[in-house]
Structures are given as C-alpha cells and as structure tokens.
Amino acid sequence: MRQVAVVGGGIAGLAAAYRLTRLRAQHGLDFEVTLLEASGRLGGKIKTDRSAGVVIEAGPDSFLTTKPDAVELAREVGLASRLLPTAQDAKDVYVYLRGGLRRLPEGLMLMAPTRVWPFLRSDLMSFPGKLRMGLERFLPRGGSGDESLAEFTRRRLGREALEAIVDPLMAGIYAGDAEAMSLQSTFPQFADLERRYGSIIRGLRAGAKARPPGSGSGLTPFASFLGGVEELVEALGRSLGEATVRTEAPVRSVRRAGKGFLIDAGGGAIEADAAVLALPAPDAAASLEGENPGLAAALRGIPAVSTATVTLGFERGSLQAMPSGFGFVVPKSAGSTLNAVTFVSQKFPQRQTEFFMIRCFVGGAGKEDFLSLGDAELLERTLADLRAMIGLAAIPKIHRIYRWNKANPQYTIGHQSRIRDIESRLQALPGLVLTGASYYGVGIPDCIRSANEKATELVNWLKTRNS
Ligand SMILES: Cc1cc2nc3c(=O)[nH]c(=O)nc-3n(C[C@H](O)[C@H](O)[C@H](O)COP(=O)(O)OP(=O)(O)OC[C@H]3O[C@@H](n4cnc5c(N)ncnc54)[C@H](O)[C@@H]3O)c2cc1C
C-alpha cells in the first residue's frame, strides 16, 4: 500500500489529511494517510480552554465566512448546527484615538467608506482627513510593484486614514506593521479595485451594488462554534476515518529516498510516496535542512512575530456599563500594550454565562518587548491599560494568558516573490507540498483552502504515477 504522510496537526494538516482521505475514496485510489504531530494534541494554534466553565480561546476566536472554505468544511464534518454567528445588532467596533473610543462608521469596508453620511457624521477623523479620503475617487491610478500597505493607504486615502483605520486594523488582524506589510499579500482586493475601477471607493460601491442581497453563507461575516473554534479540530479528528494519527511524533527530517521520502519522526521513521508539510515555515525549514539547504534558507526568509492573548472574566455585577459592540483596536501611536480588545460576551451573546468575558490581544510587530514581562506583570499592564482606556476598574475573577512564540507569520513586502522562489525550489522534490499559514493566507479559511488545493495537487500527482 502506498503511503502519504501529513506532517503537522494544525488546521492545515488536519484539513489536508481529511481531504486526502475523501479524494482517495472518490478516485478509488489505494494509499494510506499518516498524520504526524509533534505535540500531544491536535489543533496547533486552535485551542479552546473550557476548564473554567466558559469558552476561552487561546488562539483564534472566530473565522471569516465570506471566504467559504471553513464553513463548507464545518458543514461537511457535521458541524452545521454548531455554527455560531456573532451578535446581529450592536456590532460596533471602535478605534482608541485621541484619548477615547471612536466608532468605525457603518459601511466602512476594512479601509474605505462605502456610505457617505455615516462616514461624514463619525468622529473618527478630522474634517480635512475625511475630505482627503473622499478625494480618493478622483485620484489617478498609481503605484507599481509590491507596495507596503502604509504607502498604498497614504497614496490613496491620506495619512489620517492610515493612523485612524489601517494601522490599528493591521495590528489587530496580522499583529503586523502597515509600513512593512505587502498590500499584494494582505489585501490584494484593494490593489485589484484600483486597477479595475481606478478608485477603491468607486470599486467597493460598484461591488456592493452588483452583489445580490442574501448571497453568501447565510451567516454573519465572522462565526465560531457554540463550544469554541476547537470544535472544528475535534470534528476533523473524528472524521479522519482510517487515517493513522500519531501525536508526540516530532519530525526531525524529511529526505528523498527511493521513489519517495524517508520521514524521520519521534516514535519511528516512515517511508512515504508523497508528503504534505503543514508546518510553520521555520519548522518546515528545520526538517528540510539536510535535504535541500537552499529551500530551507528560502523558508527561513518568511518572518513571524510573537503575540499573546489575555482573557479576563468579570462578575457581571462588578462591571460598569461597557461600550456596546464587539470591541476596539489600538493604533501603535497610543503606546499601549494592547493591539485589540474583544468584548467576547457581546460578540457571542449566545454563550451567556455569569461572567463577562473580555479578550485582549498583545504583542506583535514593534511590541514584542511587552512579552518579556512575566504573567503577573503582563496582567497588571493589561488591566492598567483597560482602566485608562475604558475606565474598567473591576478585578477579574478569571484570567488566562496564552503566549504565541513567533506564531504570526508576516507577509512583508516581497512575500509573493519569496513564495515563487520556494515553489520553484520545491520542483526538485516532486511529491512534496507545503501548506499552512506561513504561505498562502493566515486566516483559518485560507489555511483550509490551501490544504484542499495541495491535497488535490498531490492526489493528481499520485494518479499520474499510477498509470
Ligand atoms: C493569537 C492568535 C489569534 C488568531 N486569531 C485568528 C482568528 O480569529 N481567525 C483566524 O482565521 N485566524 C486567526 N489566527 C491565525 C490562525 O489561527 C492560524 O494561522 C492557523 O491556525 C495556523 O494553522 P496551521 O495549521 O498553518 O499552523 P499551526 O496551527 O501552527 O499548526 C502546525 C502544527 O505543526 C506542529 N509541528 C511543528 N513542528 C513539527 C514537526 N517538526 N513535526 C511534527 N509536527 C510539527 C505543531 O505542533 C502544530 O500543531 C490567529 C493566530 C494567533 C496566534
């Protein structure tokens, strides 16, 4: 029996292993699938802690539904009834600016307004700043090559839009620095709108008109599961059927051997005809160092930053009224430990408990120093910032800190050409594919999409070797 190894049991590895078993059945192929995971558990960065009787997300707390891959996979593995939309009303998101929370106006599509009046009435930006943003519709096309997100925003929408909107959103989504991040690799849709419509505001408005009402997944733009994002990991684990899953099996090296690969893993090496490496780039580099040092060096060229999440549970009686909505993001000019704060109990009100849950996202580009603080100090800093920003003076009854060392890949300028270089070096290793957050998109839906694509690529390759 032929053997396909999947290395890494995060969402990308699990989705790839699942897809391989489905494709095997569909195409009537005969190969075994073995998943090798270094740690004692599956899920990687997806980890839900239910030990305090509340849902606490150590890593991701939701996923985009406008990219269909996560919702489709969830439905496929029997989680349709467990999907949890976010609150339908009170969806406000704020930016902490000029010493207070400023609401992002309705109709703002990430960086650009699609509705005039809510934008004009908002206190997010000064009048000249809004006027400059409005001028975007009349600016000529510009920019060439891989531009930074900051350069693009300044050029099209002005400096204030960068500080008030794009910079804090970038920190909240990518834990990244807008000056370093590649537009093409983070928000390619905006480059595309400029190219097609000559203006991102005009393009967004045209797109909104063209979209039929009610199209999409039928869910809110972000969703989770009743018992947290890890439900997807658990369901995938149950759906792997005849695949072999080996935890505590760190892969030390992947080398070509015969017509396939010799994979040296804790608990015993395996020979595989083909392999999916679903590992963060530095781990993939370490396993390929002996086989192909050039590829390993190219993989090491993808940077990553460290972050942490600090989740706090307050007795409801101890809290003053919270601002309505999902939470707020913080620009780096505020000099705070915090990048983003989620009012979890308002974002997912269906998970009602006696505690009001708040989650803070700290660290990231330019702020990794804060992570050298011990847990007690980090908690103290977080609480002090919340006190200063929203007047929160209560003492939490629950607190959990999760540290993520170099866990957030940074798609900096040149990311696309680094990926092209890696792909061309991979041609020396037919039967080996890479997937995961370091390469083709950091969000859960992107990881699943790329896992599906790579599993399909590998199965097609195995079929050609069959005939
Ligand atoms: C704090 C935080 C918040 C986030 N929030 C969101 C969010 O709200 N929504 C969203 O869509 N995304 C979010 N993300 C991003 C998303 O969670 C990740 O991009 C995604 O889960 C990564 O999946 P992966 O399978 O590529 O990698 P990982 O989850 O890192 O999995 C890789 C696996 O490989 C294993 N491994 C490593 N080396 C070896 C080896 N040598 N041998 C065998 N196994 C090995 C690891 O133990 C791990 O289990 C967040 C990320 C973080 C860190």
Image (tube, helix red, strand yellow):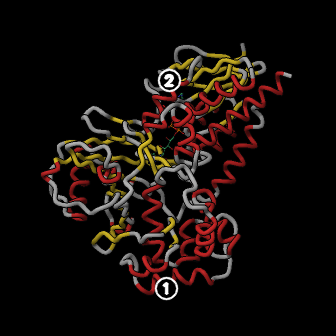
> Residue 384, which numbered label?
none
What kind of element bears circle 2? Answer: helix
Q: Is residue 283 visible?
A: no
Q: Nearer the viewer, residue 209 or 297?
A: 209
User: Residue 372: horizontal and vertical position, in percent?
Assistant: 33, 47
Quadrant (top left, top right, bottom left, bottom right) of the C terminus: top right
Q: Quadrant of the N terminus?
A: top right
Where does residue 34 sit, x and y in percent of width and height? 60, 20
Whichever of labels 2 and 1 marks the residue nearer the N terminus, that label is 1
Of 186 and 379, nearer the camera is 186
**Mark 2 to mark 1 CA distance (whole Å):** 54 Å
- The residue carrying mark 2 is 238
Q: Nearer the viewer, residue 70 or 44?
A: 70
Residue 338 left/right relative to 314: right
Residue type, numbered disc 1: Leu
- In the picture, measured across the screen, residue 28 lies left or right of residue 146, that is right
Disc 2 residue type (three-letter): Arg
Position in image of residue 214 (x %, y %): 54, 57
Q: What residue appears at the point 21 percent right and 51 percent down from the top-left corner?
A: 380
Q: Position of residue 200 (x, y in %)?
A: 60, 72
Query: Which residue lies at the image location 51% right of the left edge and 80% below the top edge?
Result: 133
In the displayed structure image, the side of residue 43 where residue 144 appears, left or right: right
Which residue is most to the right?
467
Say which residue appears at 33% left-offset and 56% top-offset: 341
Residue ID for mark 1: 131
Crowding at mark 1 (Cα within 10 Å: few <14, some 14-19, many 20+):
some
Residue 335 seen in the current view? yes
